[in-house]
């Protein structure tokens, strides 16, 4: 059955290790975590489980992430035999940028809208991997998926996000007109 997936990846290496952002596809996955709406649960996959992850992702009718079109999908491309970019995709950061005309971090959105923050900074994930702290890495990545899922649900259900204003202690209400993509009828799969 087709699924709606919220996902996030962490990498073994950094942009500095691969010669800059233009070489995003040269980054290597350490872990990928996701939430399956069909199963109602979170799962994590290590680099050695990319075949299992591919089986899950290729049946998605919608994938949801944060900065995932410019980061996660290009990194995952070398691990899959199908074009992940061909699946309908809701990238929260991309949608916020369209409406706000600037970037904003996941942690800032989480604090402003959910009252929670990320459990670590992105570059710490490579340290977790390098230090062999796989459970910490999986917990960090799963927490980012939870935050991403909760922010997606806010956009879908209330149609806006609160954005902290620069230099003043107030929030701006950012309208996010989003219509939920429904699973296509079985005949269209």
Image (spheres, grey):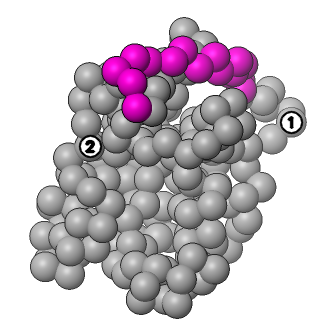
Q: Using residue 161 as the reference point, say whether residue 186 is left or right of it.
A: right
Whichever of labels 2 and 1 marks the residue nearer the N terminus, that label is 2
Residue extending furthest toward the front: 167
Q: For the point 60% across and 13% down, which residue is it?
A: 159
Q: For the point 20% across and 46% down, which residue is it?
A: 119
- Label 1: which secondary element: helix
Kindly identify which residue carries mark 2.
Answer: 118
Q: For the point 38% across and 53% down, which residue is it?
A: 33
- Label 2: which secondary element: loop
Q: Which residues are magenta?
A: 167-182
Would you say residue 86 is visible in this rendering?
yes
Q: Of the residues tagged 2 and 1, which is closer to the observer?
A: 2
Q: Which mark is residue 188?
A: 1
Quadrant hosting residue 179: top right
Q: Nearer the viewer, residue 161 or 130?
A: 161
Vertical comparison of 12 with 107: above or below? below
Quadrant hosting residue 92: top right
Quarter of the figure that contains the N terminus: top right
Q: Nearer the viewer, residue 59 or 176?
A: 176
Q: Identify the main secondary structure in magenta.
A: loop
């Amino acid at each position: 059955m087709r699924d709606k997936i919220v996902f996030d990846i962490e990498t073994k290496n950094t942009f500095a290790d691969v010669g800059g952002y233009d070489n995003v596809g040269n980054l290597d996955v350490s872990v990928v975590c996701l939430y399956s709406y069909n199963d109602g649960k979170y799962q994590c996959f290590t680099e050695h489980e990319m075949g299992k992850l591919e089986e899950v992702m290729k049946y998605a009718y919608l994938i949801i992430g944060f900065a995932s079109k410019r980061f996660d999908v290009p990194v995952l491309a070398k691990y899959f035999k199908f074009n992940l970019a061909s699946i309908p995709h809701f990238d929260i950061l991309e949608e916020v940028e369209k409406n706000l005309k600037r970037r904003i971090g996941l942690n800032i959105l989480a604090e402003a809208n959910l009252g929670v923050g990320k459990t670590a900074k992105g570059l710490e994930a490579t340290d977790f991997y390098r230090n062999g702290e796989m459970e910490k890495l999986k917990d960090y990545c799963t927490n980012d998926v939870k935050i991403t899922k909760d922010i997606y649900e806010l956009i879908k259900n209330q149609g806006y996000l609160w954005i902290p204003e620069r230099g003043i202690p107030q929030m701006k209400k950012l309208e996010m007109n989003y219509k939920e993509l429904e699973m296509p009828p079985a005949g269209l799969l």
